[in-house]
Image (cartoon, rainbow, N blue to C red):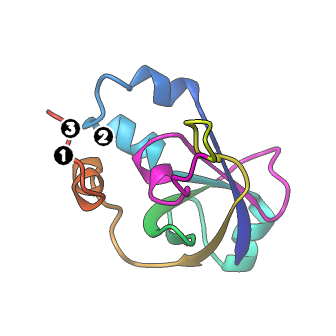
Amino acid sequence: MRAALNTGRTIRQGSYVERKNSPAYREEASSLHMNRVDMLELEIEEGDHVCVRSDQGAVVMVACPAEGLDRGEVFVCLGPFANFLVDPETHGTGMPDFKTTAVTIEPTTAPVPAVKDLMEQCGGSGYEG
């Protein structure tokens, strides 16, 4: 399925910003919020793993239904999972385009990576525990 990925802050994600290795941060940052009808068409249920792929990269996330999202629109809070998908180009502004990144979504049985592992895969260092 093709979709437009939007990113932004969530209260829950912000409350864990100092504890990025915590299970709660990983749960929030790896949640792909989707329209319920899109989930039905992909034959996935809440909690199923999906591979989300953009021109920038791909990452496994957890599907969760969200009210208020149009069909073909998905949301991920800002963080390491979103960063794997959003193009880092800033167009001279110092800030990447965190809205309407074209992605494809497909069901998978692959595991959701740990935040530390994502950081290391993209050339950074894993967060301290």
In the image, which is nearer the foreground, mark 2 or mark 3? 3
For the residue pair 89 and 69, the one nearer the viewer reads as 89
Q: Which residue is mark 2?
A: 23
Which residue is located at x 79 percent, y 65 percent? 72
Q: Position of residue 73 (x, y in %)?
A: 77, 58
Q: Position of residue 40 (x, y in %)?
A: 73, 72
**Amino acid type shown at disc 3:** Tyr
Residue 71 on the magenta span: yes
For the residue pair 74 and 40, the one nearer the viewer reads as 74
Instruction: Answer few, some or many: residues within 10 Å of disc 2's Cα (few below 14, many 20 plus, some between 14 and 19).
Output: few
Answer whether labels 1 and 3 touch (C-beta < 8 Å).
Answer: yes
Q: Secondary structure beneath disc 2?
A: helix
Task: Name the image quarter holding the C terminus.
Answer: top left
Q: Earlier in the sequence, mark 1 or mark 2?
A: 2
Answer whether labels 1 and 2 touch (C-beta < 8 Å).
Answer: no
Q: Seen from this angle, which residue lies furthest front?
A: 92
**Amino acid type shown at disc 1:** Ser
Q: The magenta stretch spans which residues? A: 65-90
Q: In whole angstroms, how far apart are the C-alphas of marks 1 and 3?
A: 6 Å
Q: Position of residue 60 (x, y in %)?
A: 43, 66
Q: Which residue is mark 3?
A: 127
Which residue is located at x 18 percent, y 46 percent? 125
Q: Which residue is mark 1?
A: 125
Q: Position of residue 20 (x, y in %)?
A: 30, 34
For the residue pair 74 and 123, the one nearer the viewer reads as 123
Instruction: Answer few, some or many: residues within 10 Å of disc 1's Cα (few below 14, many 20 plus, some between 14 and 19).
Output: few
Task: Name the image quarter holding the N terminus.
Answer: bottom right
